Amino acid sequence: MKFIDEAIVKIHAGDGGKGCVSFRREKYVPRGGPDGGNGGRGGNIVVKTSASLTTLMDLRYRKHFDADRGEHGKGAMQDGRGGADVILTVPPGTLIYDHTTGDLIADLTDDNMELIVAKGGRGGKGNAHFVSSTYQAPQFAQPGEEGEQRELRFELKLLADVGLVGMPNAGKSTFLSLVSKARPKVADYPFTTLVPQLGVVVHKSYPPFTVADIPGLIEGAHQGHGLGIQFLKHIERTKVFLHLVSLGPDETTAPLERYQIIQKELAAYDPDFKKRKQIAILTKADLLPPAELTQIQKEFTKKKIKTMTLSSVTREGLDEILELIAKIVFSD
């Protein structure tokens, strides 16, 4: 399924039905009173969240949503039927904005949340409604009200407890495949991940938690270079970042230098990212001699950067990493 995280749509709730002008006409009742029924209410436009969705694709390719109008009232005191609602289903984590003003309307973070974003118009009253002691044969009825219409912008921010960041080919997708049932594409070349991936970690001692992997960042990402910067919004809600740094032989710069490059890109995107808890994960640790690995860790320690090591081949270090991030996620 194609990943879509923004969409703009125009919506129009249903108009209310007209009230009816009618008079009772039956045998032996030559001058029956007014019996015009009321018009039905127009259908609403409703947004509902569903955890089964992970994209806004359904909204991207359909630009207009119109709810049914209410039926007109009828004679014999018959009210018109209400128009059917239109339900727009979106993933949890969807923000809804008024596209004209830019105002945030709602942040739908939970499953099965519902919000009416455009109300259907009220049905008009039939002439039977206007009967009084001094006005016994009204010849008029109300028209129905118009339904609300507006233009909305939907923006999806994935809900994850842990965010994976790092340069391309740092091992983020491999890590996600090790700790969850997610099966992102894994290969030994940059930009394997082209869209955000979400996985659920089932831990033996803690409740399940979610991990988000975004495309790798490169230097200059905040200026539009590479792929990952456009997806950083998907880790804005995370409690902890795992910054994966590859120790593979193909790297041309030192691990600490690559770590600092990505930190600068994160800060350029959102200064608040500095306040988030972070752990540096040195991946492919099995490819280095122990003495060289220890020296690299000392360089991080001098900068007061907490590091852990991981070998995706032997899974060494994986349990300790999961234990630590679970403690952080469920610490409050």
Image (spheres, grey):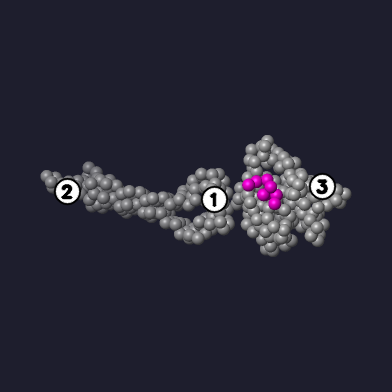
Is residue 149 shown left or right of residue 188?
A: left
Residue tagged by mark 2? 25
Q: Residues within 10 Å of mark 3 (few under 14, many from 20)?
A: few
Q: Residues within 10 Å of mark 1 (few under 14, many from 20)?
A: few
Question: Is most of the magenta stretch helix, strand or loop?
Answer: helix
Type of amino acid under label 2: Arg
Q: Which of 316 and 221 is in front in this view?
A: 316
* Residue 76 - label: none
Q: Nearer the viewer, residue 236 or 56?
A: 56
How far is disc 3 from disc 2 in space, using C-alphas?
A: 90 Å
Q: Which of marks 1 and 3 is in front?
A: 1
Provide residue 117's location: percent of width, then percent of height: 47, 51
Q: Can residue 178 be seen in this view?
A: yes
Type of amino acid under label 1: Leu
Type of amino acid under label 3: Lys
> Does the magenta run of residues contain 176?
yes
Q: Give me the residue at 63% from left, 45% from top.
A: 200
What element does badge 1 sit on?
loop
The span picked out in magenta is 174-181
Q: Nearer the viewer, residue 210 or 277?
A: 210
Residue tagged by mark 1? 53
